[in-house]
Image: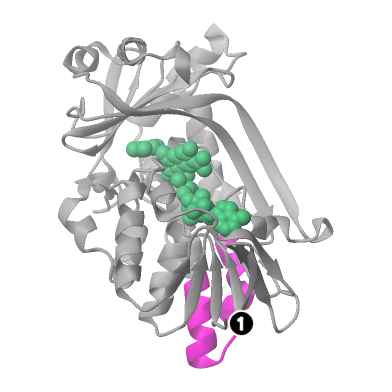
Amino acid sequence: MRTQVAIIGSGPSGLLLGQLLTEAGIDNVILDRVGKDHILGRVRAGVLEEGTVGLMEKAKSGARLHAEGLPHDGFSLAFDGRDHRIDLYGLTGGKRVTVYGQTELTRDLMAYREQSSATTIFDAANVQPHDFEGIAPYVTYEKDGVTHRVDCDFIAGCDGFHGASRKSVPEKSIRSFEKIYPFGWLGLLADVPPVNHELVYANHPRGFALCSMRSMTRSRYYIQCPLDEKIENWSDDRFWDELRHRLPEHHAEALITGASFEKSIAPLRSFVAEPMRFGRLFLVGDAAHIVPPTGAKGLNLAASDVHYLFSGLAEHYQDRSNAGLEAYSTHALARVWKAVRFSWWMTTMMHRFPDTSDFDQKIQEAELDYLTHSRAASTALAENYVGLPY
Ligand code: RFL
Ligand code: PHB
């Protein structure tokens, strides 16, 4: 098989890139090691920046997002028994975020891809990029015991943190930076109305909590938990009790609980691989970087990488210029590091670390007090939360 761009990974970054390329008339093939149902079974991010929404529109895949996504003009920071609203819209001169689940965004992109003639190969085993430092790269994979080969001009490694793309780069050519946090997030999804019409990020001496949502009838809640916590130890009742403890009283009293239909623990990590381009192989999204979810940046960073790579590929095929592709790693990393910094800062300010003393707790509360009462500090938070420009 031959294509112009071989895309490894059918997560949001692979699908969004694929859809933009298809719309621009650039042939592409997506390969994923698992199937559609598996991919749609993942519950992950929920907050989209305007840039991400704009890319969905550009990919002609934004109709349902516009109909069902919830525009949010602010969120709350809760600490010391109080609740303070960050007015995203007012502080950023009219910017907002959209609450729309990653699962739904992925479902939309898959549906539009199915309507096009673009090829997707699910359940492809042992996907491997080859010869990307030369001019004739190719990807191999196995299906039903047979090895297949996809020849291409470029390879987009959109295969997430554990994928094959980054691992195929010789160790001497890549540098990685990592920070592992000493806690995880225990997340729960339930068909109950959200406790607040906007998100609530809570700092509490017992640990961080987040009240989020997928719709006005479906809530997504998280509580900070130890890394070695076992999901079996968390009945729904125990989760709701712990969440109530960590919220200001008026939210705790208003909390509507119900049976969960998803519960899982995610570790928190910051990770960046440099560079993001190796000849004709480009790393995109989680394949190149991971952020802790506190700033809601993971999916949005994947989208901004897609923006830079798509622009470079379009320039290559339409204008016969490689300038955008050559600048990809530099442009993407400049934005990545700023989001890594923001996510690290939000995580550090909002969580209880194992060695957090009462002094450290007071410092966190003083920082939050400053942040919520200084327009300058709130503006810095708001402009990062809605997303820095591409
Ligand atoms: P994805 O979504 O991981 O998709 C990668 C795709 O590649 C496939 N794949 C392979 N295909 C072929 N060969 C291989 N060897 C392959 N290895 C993997 C996988 O099957 C998959 O389909 O990466 P992408 O597209 O870059 O998208 C990034 C986002 O998914 C990610 O940044 C966010 O979901 C991160 N994240 C969160 N971000 C937020 O902003 N808010 C959140 O609440 C949030 N929660 C999360 C998260 C990430 C999690 N991970 C990675 C475990 C919760 C979890 C549990
Ligand atoms: C979510 O709804 O899953 C979510 C929202 C905001 C975050 C992280 C996760 O910062």
Question: Which quadrant is home to the C terminus?
Answer: bottom left
What is the three-letter code of the residue carrying label 1? Answer: Asp
Q: Closer to the camera, 111 or 247?
A: 111
**Residue 79 lies in the magenta stretch:** no
Q: Is residue 132 left or right of residue 82?
A: right
Residue 383 drawn at (x, y percent): 38, 48
Mark 1 packing: few (<14 Cα in 10 Å), some, or many (20+)? some
Using the image, determine if residue 158 lies above or below residue 131: above
Using the image, determine if residue 38 lies above or below residue 326: above
Residue 233 drawn at (x, y percent): 46, 12
Q: Is residue 280 left or right of residue 72?
A: right
At x 59%, y 50%, the residue is 289
Using the image, determine if residue 118 lies above or below residue 94: below
Where ligand 2 lies, by quadrant? top left
Q: Which residue is mark 1?
A: 153
Q: Quadrant of residue 287?
A: bottom right
Q: Quadrant of residue 248?
A: top left
At x 44%, y 71%, the residue is 18
Q: Quadrant of residue 388?
A: bottom left
Residue 342 drawn at (x, y percent): 50, 42
Q: Range of the magenta residues?
A: 309-333
Query: Disc 1 beta carbon < 8 A from ligand 1?
Result: no
Residue 90 drawn at (x, y percent): 23, 46
Question: Can residue 180 be seen in this snapshot?
Answer: yes
At x 25%, y 63%, the residue is 62
Q: Closer to the camera, 120 or 290?
A: 120
